[in-house]
Amino acid sequence: MTPATKQPCVYILASRPNGTLYVGVTSQLTAWVWQHRNDVVEGFTRKYGVHTLVWYERHETMEGAILREKQLKAGSRKRKTDLIERMNPRWQDLYEQIL
């Protein structure tokens, strides 16, 4: 993996529009979302079918991304859905954008 492919990101996956949400952080967004989509890793996203990338935000540092992830996880569902709808009002899958 080259340094250019690593970029700290916070992301939100959804099971469907206004469905179950998952907030995560990674330095390899494309690879990690692919793993969620293909149920490679056991856990929440596999159990609840949370596979659609509906929001993401790039960060300069992993520390900044982790702080943002914690902020989002501590926030209300309404704050998360408002954030998604500002970037992606139709809750479309953004996976193709990040390839």
Image (cartoon, rainbow, N blue to C red):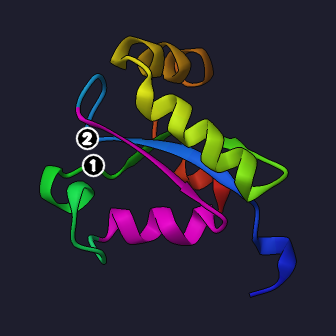
Mark number for residue 15? 2
* CB within 8 Å, label 1 to label 2: yes
Residue 25 within the segment the image draws in magenta = yes
- For the question of whether residue 86 can be seen, the reply is yes
Q: In which quarter of the image is residue 1?
A: bottom right
Query: Where is residue 50 drawn, in percent x and y?
Result: 27, 49
User: Relative to residue 6, is residue 66 depicted above or below?
Assistant: above
Which label sits on residue 50? 1
Residue extent of the magenta highlight:
20-38
Q: Which amino acid does label 2 sit on?
A: Ser
- Kindly identify the residue that appears in the image at 44 percent across and 21 percent down: 75
Give amino acid for label 1.
Answer: Val
Q: Residue furthest left?
A: 47
SS assignment at label 2: loop
Q: Whole-percent x and y of residue 54?
A: 47, 37
Work out whether residue 39 or residue 68 is closer to the camera in this orientation and state it: 68
